[in-house]
């Protein structure tokens, strides 16, 4: 039961972060990247559905994960840009 709570929270958290990246990729007309993000959103949603079939009362945990995913998505995006998107200064 505890592992389901953790998985649901992480699923909601990740969905919201990936959703923010998806919206940015769509607005920048990056079709392949936005398509990849949409698949990631679908995978997390399937994880949610798979877990909640047996435990419908865990849905609020997923919603809390969605809330915190939105809340921290800009910070996580800046961290990724800073650490994984380094460009050479010429």
Image (cartoon, rainbow, N blue to C red):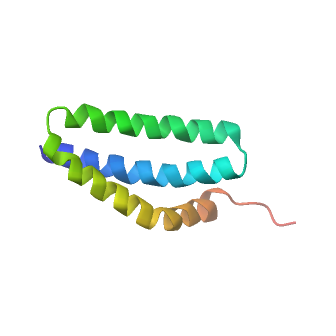
Locate residue 39 relative to residue 25 in the image: left or right: left
Q: Position of residue 76 (x, y in %)?
A: 50, 62
Q: Residue at x 65, y 47 (%)?
A: 26
Residue visible at 35% across and 50% down in the picture: 12
Q: Position of residue 23 (x, y in %)?
A: 59, 51
Q: Residue at x 67, y 36 (%)?
A: 32
Between 7 and 30, which is closer to the camera in this rendering?
30
Q: Quadrant of residue 45?
A: top left
For the image shown, how many numbered marks are present on the structure?
Answer: 0
Residue 40: x, y in percent?
Answer: 48, 38
Quarter assignment of residue 66:
bottom left
- Furthest residue to the right? 90
Image height of 45 relative to 13, above or below: above
Q: In the image, is 52 to the left or to the right of 70?
A: left
Q: Is residue 24 left or right of residue 90?
A: left
Does residue 68 appear to the left or right of 29 in the view shown?
Answer: left
Screen quadrant of the N terminus: top left
Determine the residue positioned at 28% across, 34% down: 49
Q: Quadrant of the C terminus?
A: bottom right
**In the picture, residue 47 is in which quadrant?**
top left
Residue 86, position in %: x, y?
70, 60
29 over 52 or under it: above or below: below
């Amino acid at each position: 039961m505890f592992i389901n709570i953790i998985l649901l929270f992480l699923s909601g958290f990740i969905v919201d972060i990936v959703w923010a990246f998806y919206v940015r990729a769509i607005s920048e007309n990056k079709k392949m990247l936005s398509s990849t993000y949409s698949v990631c959103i679908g995978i997390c949603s399937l994880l949610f559905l798979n877990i909640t079939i047996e435990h419908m009362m865990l849905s609020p945990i997923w919603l809390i994960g969605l809330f915190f995913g939105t809340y921290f998505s800009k910070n996580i995006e800046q961290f990724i840009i800073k650490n994984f998107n380094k460009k050479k200064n010429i």
